[in-house]
């Protein structure tokens, strides 16, 4: 059995986003139980030079929607990056999942050798499809997702490894 580009991307992204949403739900409930303003968690960061939780969610969702769109050869949806509440972060995650679900597997499969070029703040990046997915998008997605988890753990939210990994479906 072979693993397709679609199987290695979209279902993985959707599962990770659902786990991220559940982690945010637990954080919101924890903040309410401990009478902590939600903004404390949403603006928290692990180090002074790191982005706060809200930006980590924005980057995680940007990465996966950008990946699906670039591989499929379609326009990347643009989001405002103004989320400042749990409800807004949940809406962003849901919107990203809906976008991912709208991209057919047939548009992503077979893109292992597709040339992917995009600009970052300081440079232009060039990849082939498979290394773009496996060495750039997936590590970035996990980095920003786990950073959300760690910010919340650092702030005392009772989360464990299985919250990050999710159920085994």
Image: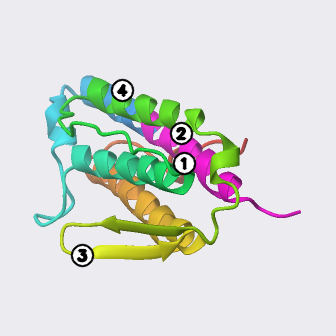
Residue at left offset 40%, top offset 54%: 63
Where residue 65 sits in the image (x, y, percent)? 44, 46
The residues tagged by marks 3 and 1 sit, at their Cα atoms, a distance apart of 26 Å
Q: Earlier in the sequence, mark 2 or mark 1?
A: 1
Mark 2–mark 1 Cα distance, whole angstroms, equals 8 Å
**Region rendered in magenta:** 1-22
Tag 4 residue: 91
Q: Which mark is residue 100?
A: 2
Q: Name the residue rendered at 40%, 42% in the picture.
A: 158
Please tell me whether residue 28 is drawn above or below residue 136 in the rendered image: above
Label 4 vs 2, first from the N-terminus: 4
Crowding near the residue tagged with mark 2, few <14, some 14–19, many ≥20 C-alpha atoms within 10 Å: many
Q: Nearer the viewer, residue 45 or 78?
A: 78
Q: Secondary structure at mark 1?
A: helix
- Name the front one of labels 3 and 4: 3
Among the two numbered marks 4 and 1 on one chain, the one whose residue lies closer to the N terminus:
1
From the viewer's perspective, is 129 left or right of 63? right
Q: Residue at x 56, y 70 (%)?
A: 134
Residue 84 x %, y %: 18, 33
Residue highlighted by disc 3: 123
């Amino acid at each position: 059995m072979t693993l397709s580009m679609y199987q290695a991307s979209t279902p993985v992204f959707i599962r990770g986003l659902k786990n991220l949403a559940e982690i945010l739900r637990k954080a919101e409930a924890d903040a309410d139980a401990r009478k902590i303003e939600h903004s404390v968690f949403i603006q928290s960061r692990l180090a002074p030079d790191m982005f706060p939780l809200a930006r980590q969610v924005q980057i995680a969702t940007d990465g996966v929607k950008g990946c699906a769109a670039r591989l499929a050869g379609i326009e990347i949806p643009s989001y405002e990056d103004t989320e400042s509440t749990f409800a807004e972060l949940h809406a962003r995650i849901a919107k990203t999942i809906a976008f991912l679900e709208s991209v057919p597997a047939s548009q992503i499969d077979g893109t292992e050798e597709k040339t992917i070029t995009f600009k970052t703040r300081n440079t232009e990046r060039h990849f082939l499809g498979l290394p773009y997915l496996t060495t750039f998008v997936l590590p970035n997605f996990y980095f920003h997702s786990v950073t959300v988890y760690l910010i919340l753990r650092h702030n005392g939210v009772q989360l464990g490894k299985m919250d990050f990994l999710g159920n085994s479906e």
